[in-house]
Each structure stands twice: as structure tokens, then as C-alpha cells.
Amino acid sequence: MLFCRLFSTSSASHLIDKSKFIPHSGFYPKGYKVGALASGVKKAGALDLAMVVSETAASAAACFTTNKFKAAPVLVDKATLQANNNAGIRAIVANSGCANSVTGEGGLQDACKMISMVDDSIGVHNSSKNHSSLVMSTGVIGQRLSMNKILPAIKELAQGDHLGSDHVHWITCAKGIMTTDTFPKLVSKRFTMGGIEYSLAGLAKGAGMICPNMATLLGFFVTDAPVEPSALQEILSHAVSKSFNCISVDGDMSTNDTITALANGAAGGELITKLHPNYNILEHEVTEFAKQLAQLVVHDGEGSTKFITLRIKDALTYEDAKKVASSISNSPLFKTAMYGEDANWGRILCATGYAGAEVNPMKTNVSFIPTDGSEELKLLVNGEPQNVDEDRASVLLKREELEVMVDLGTGGGESCEFWTCDLSHDYVKINGDYRS
Amino acid sequence: MLFCRLFSTSSASHLIDKSKFIPHSGFYPKGYKVGALASGVKKAGALDLAMVVSETAASAAACFTTNKFKAAPVLVDKATLQANNNAGIRAIVANSGCANSVTGEGGLQDACKMISMVDDSIGVHNSSKNHSSLVMSTGVIGQRLSMNKILPAIKELAQGDHLGSDHVHWITCAKGIMTTDTFPKLVSKRFTMGGIEYSLAGLAKGAGMICPNMATLLGFFVTDAPVEPSALQEILSHAVSKSFNCISVDGDMSTNDTITALANGAAGGELITKLHPNYNILEHEVTEFAKQLAQLVVHDGEGSTKFITLRIKDALTYEDAKKVASSISNSPLFKTAMYGEDANWGRILCATGYAGAEVNPMKTNVSFIPTDGSEELKLLVNGEPQNVDEDRASVLLKREELEVMVDLGTGGGESCEFWTCDLSHDYVKINGDYRS
């Protein structure tokens, strides 16, 4: 049996205490019930089926992988949203343990059967035969889902007493989509718009195979704000471009990556359209929220010991800034240097130079920015290497969080923030040794 | 002091016996003297200065890094070849231990001083003040070269009895440019053209930071065939595109990469121009030769335990085939799977899908091709996962050499060969721990 890395739960040790990333309470949006159970697809009774159900039809939006090999749930969800014609979406079901990817026509039928079972179980009677739910899968590639396990489990999850709206239900739901993740990724927040209090909750799975364009990533946001579907899609696309498409664990990108959003309007207020004066507020709230969730994915990068913020400044274009950030974040030499706590700016410069972006070598600056607000440590100023205080560099590099600033000196003034992690022995162990 | 990975010689253990890649004899071209000595730039008296001198002015050509941060020797050599106006080049000097990169105006002057010292030492009296030699450097970034060590050493190397034309001189020369390399990379061969016997010799340094577009790579070919300079440049560019630009160790690309070629015509015969009937013979010979040398670089990939040939078939264009090969070869998930001897075709497929090339998912095939000529092991046929004989897969993956075939099924019929290695614990050790 061949299977994807995503199948196994890592047994490698992690040096960082990641329990601090798990919330003990939250602000959850009205009108949703969530939960998870163990369908039996994953071994040993692990949670592997998660669901979120909106009491009423919600506006929906999604961003999908750009991989040419798209898994069945990706193809089916795309079609569902296209056919939906603003009728709204009632639920999202997500399973881990099997990605339903490279599974041919049968896999597409399996994904549709999952959705139909959700629709039936929550009492959607759709005369148009269009789907009213979305489906996501993550796990083994090239293997069919066990329909005889998944379908009864969906019914049980939807109709039993598994779903609820308390913190414990949300945490359980986040656990239901974990693969090699070492902690459930859940964030929530309250914000005010037009005098009304709204909530946003989001969860994600990540771990390895994370890179620009949302690799091996499942996630969804839900809110009780009322948002018109096309406005929700624009907001989600913008938020993803500044968050999930600005992170890299290992530069790989999966066949299944999907981020969806639901907005059911349960908290009331005016419908947010693209022209509504509060559109920008909502876009800002969702974008900052998405960054928070995306950063959790980097914090759980396979085997990672460092969380690194890359701040690229004065690029000719935003795309150029992102190219440079992506190039640095995917450089194994940079990532191993960070793991080795080595202030090796030559590797940062090399990766900057081959990114394919405009750079002014004579005006390029590279610094480490301490996260405690103390003075930056300049490594390169206008293309000239600095005499670096090695002791201070060593102190900064020993910290769990570090910021690297690269100023390209082009005069273009464009910038980008990007988050990545180091490349450790544990990464090789998790991805190279896990079958042994 | 900050320095580049290239500085240290690895102390990590290597499981593979690489002494088999070191030749015990060779066919060396007429009219050249080569050698190396220890200038003192590298510590502990290691060889760090290599030179090749042609008895007569030779046609010269070069391919350089495309990194935006170009080291001083790269900039100086580019200018030298442009100004040369077919007057010919007499020598190449190459040093290891210091890359003379990100060293500003002073670094450019240092590179010029090295060349002038070579020219003076071998008795070139060039009234035009144009350089008659090329210079290459590899090692520490951001540090000035010790001119007080390098300049006398150049004179000593050129005028003492260090240079010669025997096998031992060639091996010594190859050792002079090693950094983290675990063995000197030297190849030579004889070929016949127009009834005359010619020789080709080439040497390279590599190890880490190798990726498409010639990363941290110094190399040069010399031949005793008579070749017109622009024909030599075309032949070299073609050969490099099929060899050094088709290898990847870690996807990084340095500021110093340079491959040069000299052709002094010492074996006689007709001058090979682009229109000469033997042009294609020479191009073929040089290209196959370059592949051999480039493959040695992959065999010495930092920490590598596997040598992997990627054969991409039926791409829409050659560029697409190369994109797919490059994407697979730079995927940490693929590389760790190979290290872990895991027949994980899902990772091959993922990297194929995000390469940005045209792919027909329903007609994609993936196989392992055994190097012993036995039947291929089909993993994916027309997009359908195969029931794989895991025992046979395990046997194939335990071997040091493996070939992976990916057929993109586009109908375009274009193909490419590419060479890469795995990503091991030793890679992380060499690049992350070496300062500890």
C-alpha cells in the first residue's frame, strides 16, 4: 500500500511547547453547530470527520489549490459553488485520513455521495438537485474512501448529539481534520461593524507541504455577519493572498488545498456588498484573522523549531516582494542556517538574488529585527557587509521567533510580510523515516 | 565573522564510497599545463588555488550565474570576454576559501589584480591592457580576499614547478577548487573528428547550493580542438543547458557560478565554426561530456545517499519538461521520501502538478525504471494508481541509483533528463550544525 506522508501522525519529538497555541475559550458566531467524530477511516479511533452546519443557508466562498492534479472534493466543490446561484450553503464536511485524490470517476462519485448524505441528514430537500454542502478531504493519496464507514458516520455526526456551539465543540471540530498536525488550529474573535457585534471563527489543518498557494491546507472561516456571496469571495480571496499564500513550510503544494468561508447573517445588520461602506472593515477583519490562522500553521510546520517573519521592503511590485519572500522561505540553505542559529546573511542574499525579482544590489539592506522591540541588527547596508556583533546575533537567533528584513532598494516602495519556519532534523525524520 | 556554508569542509559521515568517482588516469588535451597549491587563504594548508595555462592563446567561452548578486570574478570575466575581441585567453585561475562576493569596488579590483598577476607571471605582455586570463572564486561571501597571500601564490604557481600536464597535475588542480566537496571532480576523454584525435578534460566543484542555472558551481572544460570563439560559446551554452542546468541538489543558486571553456587548437585540424560539418560532432561530444561532469556534482550532493535520474516525457515543450523535473527535484517531500526509500508517488505527482507546466492528469504515467534494465515498475498509469508490488519497490529503492519516469501525456512529445539526489539527515547536519 502506497500512501502519502499525511497519513501518519508524527512521533518525532518537538522541542517547542505548542500547547500555548490552543485556546481555552473563544467568541463563536451565532447560528452554527460544529463537531467531529471517529468514522473509522483513521486507525485507532482517532477523530477524522468534522462538520459545521449553519442553521440557515449561508453565503459561501472558497479558494482552491492551483495544483494541476485536483482532488475529487476540490472539483466537486468548485462545481457546487458555480451551480449554487446564491441559493446558499448549509454545511461543510471534512475528513482526514484519506484525501480522495487521484481516485478517478469513482472518487468524484464518493465526494458527491458524502455531500448528499450531509444534505439528507440535515434535512435539506433541494428540488434542484444542487448540492447545499461542501466537502474537504486530506490524507492518503490514490486510495478510495471507505464509503461504508464515512456515510453512516456523516449521518451519525449530523443527527446524533455530536454537534454544538460551545468551545469544546469547536476544538473537537478542529481536531477532526488534523493529520500530522501536533495541535488543533482554532481562532475566533469578536468585532463591531455598524454598531453590531459579530464573531468570526476559523480552523485549519497544516503541518507539512505548506507553501505559497495554500499547500496541504484545509481551513474554513465562518461568521454571523450578513455578506453577499460575491463580496464574500472577494474578501476571502484578498485575505488568503495576504495570509495562507504568504506562508511556506517546505514549498510543496498539495492536490487538496481548500479554504472556504460561510457567512449566515445570524447576527443581523445590513447586507455587506462590495459597495457597502463597511466592506473595507470586514475585509480588514477577515484578513488579519486569516493571518493569525495561517501563522498557526507555520508554528506547527513539520519539525520546526523557529517561527520566522520575512519582511520584504522597497520592491518594484508587490509580486516581486512576494517572489523574494517565497524564494528565501523555500531555500533549504536559509532554513538549515536558521535551524543551526547561524547569522548567515549570504544565504539570504543568494535566495534574494535568484528570486527573479528586480533588485538593486548596491542599495540592498538586510537586518534581523528583534521581536522585543530592541534595535535592529544590521547585516548588510547598501550592499556593504557590516561588522556584526556576533554575540548579539547569537542571542537573537536562539529565540523561537525572529524577523528578517530585506530592503531591495528599487525605489518601488512595495512590501510584503511572509511567514516561514526552519528545516530541522525532525523534518527529515518525519518525512523520510516515518515508514520505518 | 559571518561566512558562507562553503567555507567548512564537512565532517559528516557519508555512507556511499565515493572514491569510485575519482579517475586513476586520463586523456588530457595538448598544450595545457595545470596545477594547484595552498595559498594560505584556506586554513591548515589545504589546496585553494588552481590554475590552467594554455601554451597559446585559446578561444574562450563562459556561462555565468543568473543571480542578481554577481560576485566580482563573474563581473570581471564577463567584461574580459566582451573586451577580448577574439584575441584569446591564456589562463584560468580559480581559488577556493573566499568567494570574493558582496565585496564592492574593492572586490572588483582584487579580481583584476589576480588576473594581472597571472598575465604577468606567464609572460603575457598585452599592449591593449585587456586581460588575457579568467578568474573564478568560491567560498566565504562578504569577505575580502587576502591579496598578500593570493598574489605571491599566483606567481609561485605560474612560475614554480607546480604546473604540468600529467594526471597527477590534473587531479591536484581539481582538488584546488574543492569546498565542501568530498572528492575532486575530474573527467577526460578522447574523441575523433575529421580523422584527428582530440582530447577534452574538465573539472568542477559543487556539493551544495546546486540547482538549475548552475548554483555554487565552478567548472571548466579545455580541449585541444581548434574552435572559433562564438562557436565555442554556442557549444558551451548548449552543453550547460543540458547538463549543469539539469541538476539540482538543494535548489539554491550562488553568486559565483561559472563554467568556462578553452579551445587552443594544439591538436591541429580545421577550425570549427558554426557552419563547419563537424560542428554537430563537437557539440555532441562536449554535451555528453558536460553531463558526465554534472552528474559527478550530484553524486557529491551534500549528505546525499541516492543518485536519481528524472526522465520527463511527452511534455508540451522542452521548457515544460524541465519545469516539472526541476519542481520534483526541489521538492523536500520527494527528496526525503527517496532518502526514506518510500515509493511515495503522491509526492511526485504533487510536485508535477504545481510545476506550472501543461499536464494531462488523465494521461499521466509514473514509473520507477530499474538501472539494471529489468522491467519498469508502474506506479500510475493514465492517472490511475496501480497495485504496486511493494517488495519489488523496496528492492529498487534500496539501490544507490534510481530512475523516475513521469509521462505528462500532453501529446507534445518533448522530454528532458535531469539529475538530483535525496535530502538526508546529513544535509541538515552539514548546513545547520556545522558551526557547532
Image (cartoon, coloured by chain):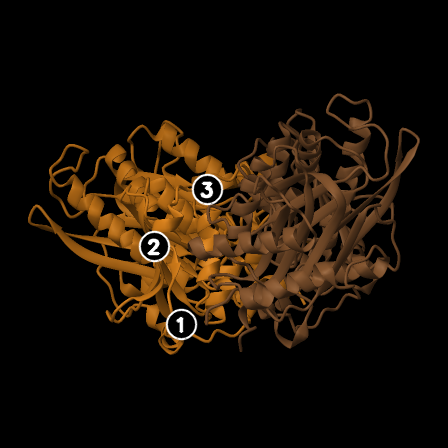
Chain colours: A brown, B orange
Q: Nearer the viewer, residue A308 or A269?
A: A269
N-term mark: 3 or 1:
3
Cα gap from disc 3 to disc 1, whole angstroms: 28 Å
Q: Tag 3, which chain?
A: B
Q: Nearer the viewer, residue A13 or A97?
A: A97
Residue hosting label 1: B397
Q: Percent position (x, y) of residue A375? A: 85, 44
Are discs 3 and 1 less than 8 Å apart at CB? no
Dividing the picture into quadrants, the one containing residue A240 is top right
Q: Percent position (x, y) of residue B152? A: 49, 51
Cα gap from disc 1 to disc 2, whole angstroms: 23 Å
N-term mark: 3 or 2:
3
Residue hosting label 3: B356
B77 to B259, vertically: above or below: above
Q: Identify the mark at residue B382; answer none if there is no mark.
A: 2
N-term mark: 1 or 2:
2
Task: Kindly state the secondary structure of the residue where label 2 is placed.
Answer: loop
What amino acid type should be assigned to the residue bearing mark 2?
Asn
Mark 2: few, some, or many residues within 10 Å (few <14, many ≥20)?
some
Q: Which mark lies nearer to you, 3 or 2?
A: 2
Q: In this view of the protein, can residue A433 be seen by the observer?
A: yes
**Residue at screen point 46% across, 72% down:** A1
Q: Tag 1, which chain?
A: B
